[in-house]
Amino acid sequence: MKLRQLECIDDIPAEQWNRLAGDANPFLRHEFLAALEHNGCVGETYGWLPRHLLVLDDNSSPVGAMPLYAKDNSYGEFVFDWAWADAYERAGMPYYPKLVCAVPYTPATGTRLLVAPEDPHADEIRNLLGAHAREYALRSGMSSLHWLFPDAADTGTLAEQGLLLRMGCQFHWENAGYRDFDDFLERFSAQKRKKVRRERKRVTEAGVELEVVHGHEASDEQWRTAHHYYHSTFEKKWGYPTLNLGFFREIGRTMGDRVVLVFAYHDGRPVAGAINLRGRDTLYGRHWGCDARFHSLHFEACYYQGIDYCIRTGLQRFEPGAQGEHKISRGFLPTATWSAHWIADARFRQAIGDFLRRETVAMEQYMEELADHAPYKAAPARE
């Protein structure tokens, strides 16, 4: 087998990349990663330099791949290592550049070591991807290499390779075969059920109407509106709106019904919107914004519309994004997420490893405490 490094996702045909990425996670699709590159959402401006890794068979056909980026900052990763960078600086050592295997600006769990599932050499290819990425990091003088939000299989592979594991927490909803939204609420305690119904009623009483539009159905005006809401939220929170209108237009064109937009209207005018993407069995909430404040509209547009969409379309899971303990009372349960870390310097590797062991114990306790606040009369079916 041979190895190849790409500085542009278009250097591999979309069908070859997608054969390895599969259809479970929309963010790993060639179309999504290409839209980021085509529209300058990654690159030197934001410090995400593509260094995608391929494994080729004897016929030079890709049999393994990894979305890889050289970083000169920690923005847009959602696994926070600012304290590690500060410790390096105080020790007189550079933390940047580093390597990151991730989907930029996207805290969604998925495959990171991309291999066709039917490949008889899948384990060998995954190990080769991990080993070569570490060799590349060492050869390039990188301080570290980080796999962000790998799925369970890849987390296990990386742990076997001796990487440090870091545990995080998100809040996910799972479809326990609900017939409709009311059936979902019937699983709640009476008090929690009443609260959700009251929140939904407040939106209706305010005269707000909701509409779900798929990417290929959205007009250019609707894409402008969606981007406006995305941009305005970052401005309000002093963030960096790295995704531009060109990016959203492109994924609407190339990803079609994998993009799920929710618009809220009042008196016929848009007042809020949410941007989601869907995979084979999961809906992923990503961005939200509003021009006017209506009681509970955020919950309706970002959570309840998504749950209702999953039930209607048969999706099994809804991951509404990072953070947010308020999601628990609305049916989202604490769920572990993972990252894996290779640290070049032995002293820092030991210190970070000690920290992660303590942090994991605290995170487990935190999740146990949160689970006690679940709104369900009995725990819903979980995988």
Image (spheres, rainbow, N blue to C red):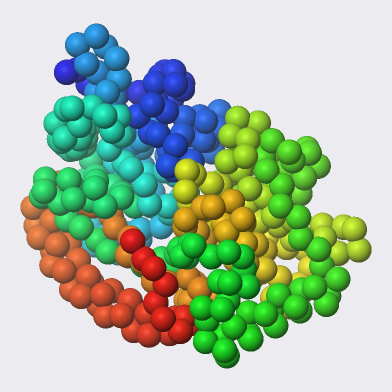
Relative to 309, say whether 142 is above or below. above
Q: What residue is shown at x 44% (from left), y 68% (from top)?
A: 171
Horizontal and vertical percent for residue 306?
60, 60
Relative to 182, say whether 289 is above or below. above
Q: What residue is shown at x 56% (from left), y 85% (from top)?
A: 192
Quadrant into which the N terminus falls? top left
- Residue found at the very far right of the displayed protein: 267
Q: What residue is shown at x 62% (from left), y 68% (from top)?
A: 181
Horizontal and vertical percent for residue 153?
24, 47
Relative to 246, say whether 178 is above or below. below
Q: How many marks?
A: 0
Q: Is residue 75 visible?
A: no
Quadrant into which the C terminus falls? bottom left
Horizontal and vertical percent for residue 301?
67, 63
Would you say 35 lies left or right of 50 here? right
- Residue found at the very far top of the displayed protein: 59
Q: What residue is shown at x 32% (from left), y 65% (from top)?
A: 336
Horizontal and vertical percent for residue 280?
47, 43
Q: Is residue 22 visible?
A: yes
User: Viewer-proximal residue, 373 or 106?
Assistant: 373
Would you say 167 lies left or right of 131 here? right
User: Viewer-proximal residue, 332 or 109?
Assistant: 332
Would you say 16 lies left or right of 145 here? right
Would you say 35 lies left or right of 108 here? right
Question: Dividing the picture into quarters, in which one does residue 72 lie?
Answer: top left
Question: Dividing the picture into quarters, in which one does residue 233 lie?
Answer: bottom right
